[in-house]
Image: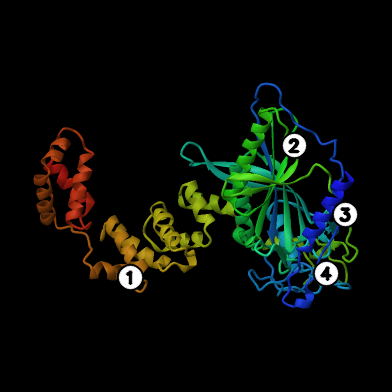
Amino acid sequence: MAASSAAAGALLHNINKQILIFHPNAAFHQCVIRRIGTSAPRCQSQPQLKRKSAPQQLVGVVGLEVHAQIHSSTKLFSGSQVRFQAPPNSMVSFFDASLPGTLPALNRRCVEAAVMTGLALNCTINRKSLFDRKHYFYADLPAGYQITQQRRPIAVDGALTYSHLGGKKRSQVLNKTVRIKQIQLEQDSGKSLHDDHRSQTLIDLNRAGVGLMELVMEPDMSCGEEAAAAVRELQLILQALGTCQGNMSEGQLRVDANVSVHAPGDPLGVRTEVKNINSARYLARAIDYEIQRQTGVLQRGGTVQNETRAYDSKSGQTIPMRDKEGLQDYRFMPEPNLPPLMVYGDNASLPAGVDARQAVVVERIREGLPELPGVKRDRLVHAYAILPEHSFTLVSEDGLVDYFEALVKETKKEPRKVIGWVTKELLGHLKQQDLSVSQSPVSPSALAELLDLQETGHISSSVAKRVFQEMWGSPGKTALQIVQEQDLGLVSDTAELHSICQRVVDSNPDQVQAVRNGNKKVLNKLMGLVQKETKGRADPVLVRAILEEKTS
């Protein structure tokens, strides 16, 4: 046993040798070495779930921990700038690097963002919250501890109401609620960059000290789809508030999922934690895989291990990282360099001598809350008589609601007819070219002119789509100019249409006979042939009437 421990110690010593702190100044290179005990016995009191009987119906239980990067120009406790993809270690203050003698200075913007988020999620805002040190060793945590809020966080006891589409056609809106246990302010760590070619790890401290809100959700969800819907709703809320940009690909929103399974009525099972998922789609897949994996383990008579796992998007599986059987001691202690964080209900509650402009006042922040996504969806459905799934699409795309409402104000078309143009034609072109709504070459007023030409009977629906394509490629041209230049107006000359319809009828005797035998659907094919002859310019109502007369 002694030989085994000695070998493990030597191995860890060699590994730690390869962890370097990378800094543009070569004199800043340091080697971080700490001996880690490896012989501690596993905790025997950890509950184990074992199934020896016939397979039971097991259900999943899911809780989430979401780390949201606060949208602020500077870090939580220092004046260092926050900028994604800045050169390594170029946004690091003495405090971020944990040099001796440096002290934290709390960023008021981060506090206000946490309070605003708490209000939007129906939390109770603690008028007095505390900061703590959470000790653990990691190479990209230079102080050896993280400043967080373990004892008394800034917001508690909230709820997130989210919706997702269900039913056979996925057109039914299912509303659910997940409880928010707490929201706490804390520092982010740096970033480890693994160089496999040189067998070393480089440390970038640009992210160290960036302000985070950790939102802890209770285990009120049962599957990946629910968890993904909750995270998407949270993402939309944070973006609407402006407290977090929510770009998951840039690590601004990272999710840890706690997953377990149990038979209904039994105690909750042993949970595993799937760490650092940066996509709602991957979150759903990781949770569903983990539920299936744990179910399979228990139904085979095995035991689910309390461990941390990672999601491999290529294989679609979760893989073990480390076990959590032994309770880790973070040695929480009050942060001695920060006083209690005080926020005030309103201006009247401010103590004498406190500058109202410097204080964090809850009511003032509440008054600045914007329209939240759920409220906005309900308003769109009731105000414009659109389908719920359309409201989801509008709210989920930044700027699309404003575009739609501006378009509705300027066109004669009914909103129910306008929505298809926005969610299919406009959004389809934007996605195809990876553009945002604000970058659309077709403005709401330009599209309104096109829709009015269709609504007033000057062009057909097929021609309208052709004109839209032309407008997309030639932003300087109006819809009317394109219609006139290319002679795309509707052919409404009755004599000319009678002549074209007669040629189509004479050329397709089989289809004509089918219509006369009662197959009215074939009439649509004949109409299509007429439209082909007229390049989509024939009035469809008039064409149908003429064809019905000639095939009767």
Residue on which disc 2 sits: 270
**Which element is circle 3 on?**
loop
Q: Mark number for residue 332? A: 3
How many angstroms separate mark 1 from mark 3 (CA)? 66 Å
Q: How many labels sit on residues? A: 4
Circle 4: residue type: Ser
- Disc 4 marks which residue? 98
Question: Could you tell me the amino acid type at mark 1?
Answer: Thr
Does residue 148 appear in this view? no
Distance (Cα) linking label 2 and label 1: 64 Å
Residue 478 is tagged as 1
For marks 4 and 3 on the same chain, the one whose residue lies earlier in the sequence: 4
Q: Earlier in the sequence, mark 4 or mark 1?
A: 4
Give the foreground label among 2 and 3: 2
What amino acid is labelled 3 in the image?
A: Phe
On screen, residue 230 versus residue 157, left or right, reads: left
Label 2: which secondary element? loop
